[in-house]
Amino acid sequence: MKPTREKVRELIDEGMKPKEIAEKLGIKPATVYTYRHMFKKEEEPIKSEDRENLENENKELKQEIKKLKKANKSISDELIQVKEDYEELTNKHIKMSNSISDEHKEVESLQKVIKELRKENEGLNVMKNRLIDEAREEIEVLESNYKSEKAKHETLFRYITLAKEVS
C-alpha cells in the first residue's frame, strides 16, 4: 500500500484537481493543497548562496567527523593503556604475594587489592561505555546531517546538470 503522499503526487501528475483527489482518497482538500505546496518546494532550485552554505556546512561536518574519529581513537588508546595498567598491577600483586611469608596477610592483602581493582575497573568500564555511547550518538547525528546535506547536494547537482542541458 502506498502512502497518501505518493498517491496524491500520482493523482496530481495525472492532472486531477485537488478537490477530486481529496474525494477519491477520503482526505481533506487542505491536505492535498499542503502536499501540492510541498511538491513545488521540492522542485525549486537551490540558490547559489544556499549552495555555498551547504558546501561550507558539509566541510564543517566532515571536519567534525574527523575530530570524532580522532577522539574515538584516543579513547580506544586510553582503554588499552588502562588494560595494560591493570595487568601490570595484577602482576605486581602476584610478585608481592610471593614475598609475603604470612599466608593470612597475603590472602587478605590480595583480596583487598582485587576488590579495589574491580571497583576501579567497573568505574573505568562505566566511563568508557559512556564515552563510547556519546561518541556514537555524535557520529549518528553527524552521519544524519551528512546524509541530509548529501541529498541536498545531489539535488543541486541534478538541477545544475539539468540547467546546463537546457542551456
Image: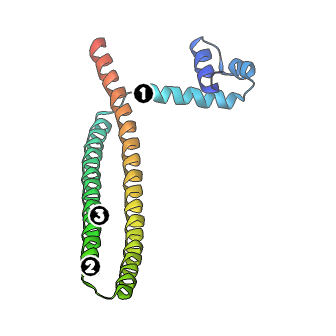
Within 10 Å of disc 2 (Cα), the crowding (few <14, some 14-19, many 20+) is: few
Give the residue type at disc 2.
Asn
Of labels 3 and 1, the one closer to you: 3
| Disc nearer the start of the sequence (2/1) | 1
Tag 1's secondary structure? loop
Judge by depth and name the residue closer to the eye, 135 or 107. Answer: 107
Label 2, label 3: how many angstroms apart (C-alpha)?
23 Å
Image quadrant where residue 55 sits: top left
Check if mark 2's residue and mark 3's residue have beta carbons within 8 Å: no
Q: Is residue 150 left or right of residue 78?
A: right
**What's the residue type where badge 1 is placed?**
Glu
Q: Residue at x 40, y 48 (%)?
A: 141
- Residue 98's tag is 2
Which mark is first along the chain, 1 or 3?
A: 1
- In the image, which is nearer the foreground, mark 2 or mark 3? 2
Residue located at (63% from left, 26% from top): 3
* Rendered view: 118 above or below 135: below
Residue 138: x, y in percent?
38, 52
Q: Is residue 83 left or right of residue 43?
A: left
Marks 2 and 3, the one that precedes in the sequence? 3
What x and y, as percent, mark residue 21? 68, 19
- Circle 3 — which element? helix
Residue 133 lies in quadrant: bottom left
Where 135 falls versus 36 (above or below)? Answer: below
On residue 44, the disc is: 1
Residue bearing mark 3: 83
Q: Position of residue 65 (x, y in %)?
A: 29, 48
